[in-house]
Image (spheres, rainbow, N blue to C red):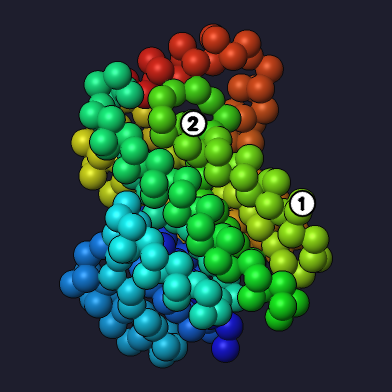
Amino acid sequence: MPTALITGATAGIGAAFARRLAADGFTLVLVARDEQRLAESAEQLKLRYGGAVETLPADLSTEDGLTAVESRVRDGVDLLVNNAGFAHPGGFLETPVEDEQRMLKVHCEAVLRLTLAALPGMKSRGRGAVINVASVAAFFTRGTYSASKAWVVNFSTAAATEVGHPRVKIMALCPGLVRTEFHERAGMDTSGFPGFLWLKADNVVGEAMRDLALGRVISIPDLRYKAIVAVGRLVPRNLAAQFSTRVGR
């Protein structure tokens, strides 16, 4: 059976990927910081789908955690889902620089190193895929979060071009608002966001897997967000930045 490694696998989009890939017959390697929650998630997946599930407790904001996951990826995976991530409740001027550096470690350095760890094995086997979870925020301007996600999109696009193998795919997944615990854990007030903009994690993953099969390099789930990104590209950058800052607050 093919093997999929998912970071940030116990909640939200990561957990939805775990469910979908377990149902598709993948052997899973689940990565997250909370060891107890990781074990509970693995047990639930094994009971429901019957497949093999391996757990790897690791904090990707630490060198030890990132090195451990990097080593496991080099051992061989057929699908890597770089999903781990988080947000800060305030703007970057209100956030300690240590927290900003931790975000860049998880959103950028971990994505870079794990992708590079996966690609040699995928190329030698002649198959494989990497999904790097970014955000619709990558196409707008608001602090370190959107900047880090823009890096994920640019890196994924460049890597997909340079990998040079038709059966080794790299895709950036750019969801909008998704009903998960992401915003609550960041201490963000979401009451101002319109209800019609919220997506379900399982639907996001379904569209992502379809786009991956179609060979798309950037996946923006849902027509509403495709339209938002298209309109955003027509708006002058400084106006878009002012708007996204107001919306984010």
- Within 10 Å of disc 1 (Cα), the crowding (few <14, some 14-19, many 20+) is few
Q: Position of residue 121 (x, y in %)?
A: 64, 75
Q: Is 51 left, or right, of 36 in this rendering? A: right
In-image side of 49 versus 97 (left or right): right
Q: Is disc 1 placed on a helix, strand or loop?
A: helix
Which residue has dot 1 on it?
A: 161
95 left or right, relative to 140: left
List the residue tagged with mark 2: 147
Amino acid type at mark 1 = Thr
Residue under the image location 25 percent in, 77 percent down:
39
In front here: 36 or 45? 36
Q: Residue furthest left?
A: 36
Vertical side of 243 occupied by 101: above or below: below
Mark 2 neighbour class, 10 Å CA radius: few under 14, some 14 to 19, many 20 or more:
some
Query: From the image, which quarter does the N terminus lie in?
Result: bottom right
Going 43% across and 46% down the picture, which residue do you hit?
Answer: 107
Residue 128 in which image quadrant: bottom right
**Which amino acid does the dot numbered 2 rest on?**
Ala
How far apart are the alpha carbons under marks 2 and 1?
A: 21 Å
